[in-house]
Image (tube, rainbow, N blue to C red):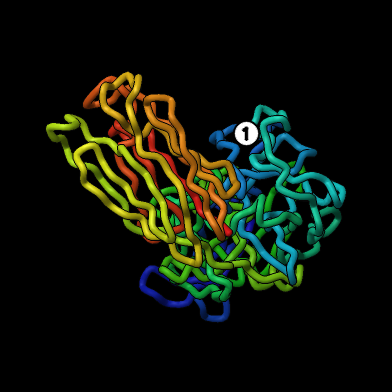
């Protein structure tokens, strides 16, 4: 037997769930004090980190080094080991901000020294070279894991924090996920809909399938006993994979209330395990940091062609006040409206002294974490949009591996949906060349 939990039968009656490593375990009860007992063969539960050390299953996907401030939900790790887990969430205590993940991700199962560098991405994703990573912060504190020896002491959390700052660490997920978690914690209840964004499996949704779980978790070569845990399942596909350790489970609704800190699963990822997030926050004396971001809305998807310009592209990007005005080659215009006290000025109207396409067009929009967005056209001209009250990162340089309308790369569309930035598209049409300008305070 590897664990137990309180759950429900298929028809909704209370049940005791018993999890075993193998089939045919003898002596397990059908009932406990009149409550049905259900046996589930899950195999062992493993801490969800990935590493190149011998004996580990090598199933992790590679992830990128993100421009700062990096989002939550992406690859991270300690400089002392070639492994990778997930940045769960940004937390705060007073003016200080921290990255929250697992002990086995940041503190390396109690062995990493306080003050050691924490990286993004984790070394596993850079070929074990720290030159490909950003120093996100330094290890500040961790909850020691009591491993099994002659007996198995009980644990309630597998967690650690690294001190960082808002210029390096954001408090939102990548644009394809749920953005910002709430600061209001939600207690786990059976059947509660949940979601998480993790390094390996990205966004997964499921339900709380067990509460007050007691589970033995394998850390290779050690194991540890955890009590009062949350079990997650019913995800459709795998709830988690190696490298998802540290992910934050939140409610599967617009509120995204924090529920649990993910730290393990059975080997196929069908049953995930999480610490109660309230216990984690209380241990470190921190709260979830959901400080608001500047937002953007509007945009322009250009016309399909006109006499002046037979192909759709963005020809002008000009900013004034809280409005960025976009124009295409046919004279159509659109606006992106900035909110949260952010204003902008400057820009570029493309002109064509020597452009290869024969028509002026914008070919790149990029930002590197300052208050400057750089805009370039096909003639080698460039301009800048200067932000007041915000910083920007990301963007897109158009490329033309499979442009559908012409052999010249151009920025075809810019759109925003009320989130913390705007999407930038070129003429590839296959989704492979999409960028995002992210705004932050």
Position of the N terminus by quadrant: bottom right
138 to 123, vertically: above or below:
below
57 to 170, vertically: above or below:
above
Residue 154: % across, % down: 76, 65
Residue drawn at 46 percent across, 33 percent down: 382
Identify which residue, 319 or 12, lies in the foreground: 319
Residue 125: % across, % down: 62, 33
Residue drawn at 56 percent across, 37 percent down: 63
Res. 272 visible in picture: no
Identify which residue, 53 or 437, lies in the foreground: 437
For numbered disc 1, what is the local secondary structure? helix
Location of residue 206 by image quarter:
bottom left
Q: Residue furthest bottom?
A: 34
Q: Residue furthest left?
A: 307
Q: Is residue 308 left or right of residue 54?
A: left
406 to 323, vertically: above or below:
above
311 to 242, vertically: above or below:
above
Residue 85: % across, % down: 64, 45
Q: Mark 1 = which residue?
A: 125
Res. 416 visible in picture: yes
Q: Is residue 320 left or right of residue 392?
A: left
Residue 405: % across, % down: 21, 26
Location of residue 377 by image quarter:
top left
Q: How many marks?
A: 1
Residue drawn at 37 percent across, 44 percent down: 317
């Amino acid at each position: 037997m590897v664990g137990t939990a309180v759950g429900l039968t298929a028809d909704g009656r209370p049940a005791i769930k018993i999890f075993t490593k193998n089939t045919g375990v003898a002596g397990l009860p059908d009932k406990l004090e009149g409550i049905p007992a259900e046996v589930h063969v899950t195999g062992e539960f493993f801490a969800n980190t990935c590493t190149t050390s011998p004996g580990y299953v090598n199933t992790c996907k590679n992830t990128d080094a993100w421009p700062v401030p990096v989002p939550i939900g992406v690859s991270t790790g300690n400089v002392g080991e070639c492994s990778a887990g997930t940045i769960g969430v940004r937390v705060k205590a007073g003016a200080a901000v921290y990255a929250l993940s697992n002990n086995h991700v940041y503190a390396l199962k109690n062995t990493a020294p306080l003050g050691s560098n924490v990286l993004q991405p984790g070394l596993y994703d850079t070929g074990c070279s720290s030159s490909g990573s950003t120093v996100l912060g330094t290890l500040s504190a961790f909850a020691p894991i009591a491993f099994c020896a002659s007996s198995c002491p009980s644990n309630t959390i597998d967690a650690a924090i690294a001190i960082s700052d808002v210029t390096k660490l954001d408090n939102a997920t990548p644009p394809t996920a749920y953005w910002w978690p709430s600061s209001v914690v939600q207690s786990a209840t059976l059947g509660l809909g949940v979601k998480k964004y993790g390094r390996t499996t990205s966004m997964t949704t499921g339900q709380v399938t067990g509460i007050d779980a007691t589970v033995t978790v394998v850390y290779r070569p050690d194991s540890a006993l955890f009590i009062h845990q949350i079990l997650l399942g019913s995800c459709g596909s795998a709830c988690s994979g190696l490298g998802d350790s540290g992910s934050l489970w939140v409610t599967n609704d617009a509120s995204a209330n924090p529920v649990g800190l993910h730290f393990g699963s059975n080997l196929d990822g069908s049953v995930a395990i999480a610490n109660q997030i309230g216990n984690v926050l209380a241990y470190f004396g921190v709260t979830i940091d959901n400080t608001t971001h500047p937002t953007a809305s509007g945009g322009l998807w250009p016309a399909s062609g006109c006499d002046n310009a037979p192909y759709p592209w963005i020809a002008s990007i000009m900013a004034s006040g809280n409005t960025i005005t976009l124009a295409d080659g046919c004279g159509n215009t659109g606006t992106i409206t900035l909110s949260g006290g952010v204003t902008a000025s400057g820009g570029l109207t493309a002109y064509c002294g020597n452009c290869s396409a024969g028509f002026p067009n914008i070919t790149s929009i990029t930002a590197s974490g300052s208050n400057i967005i750089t805009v370039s056209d096909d003639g080698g001209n460039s301009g800048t949009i200067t932000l007041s009250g915000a910083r920007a990162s990301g963007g897109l340089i158009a490329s033309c591996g499979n442009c559908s309308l012409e052999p010249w790369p151009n920025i075809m569309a810019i759109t925003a949906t009320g989130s913390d930035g705007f999407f930038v598209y070129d003429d590839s049409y296959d989704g492979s060349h999409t960028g995002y300008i992210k705004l932050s305070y």
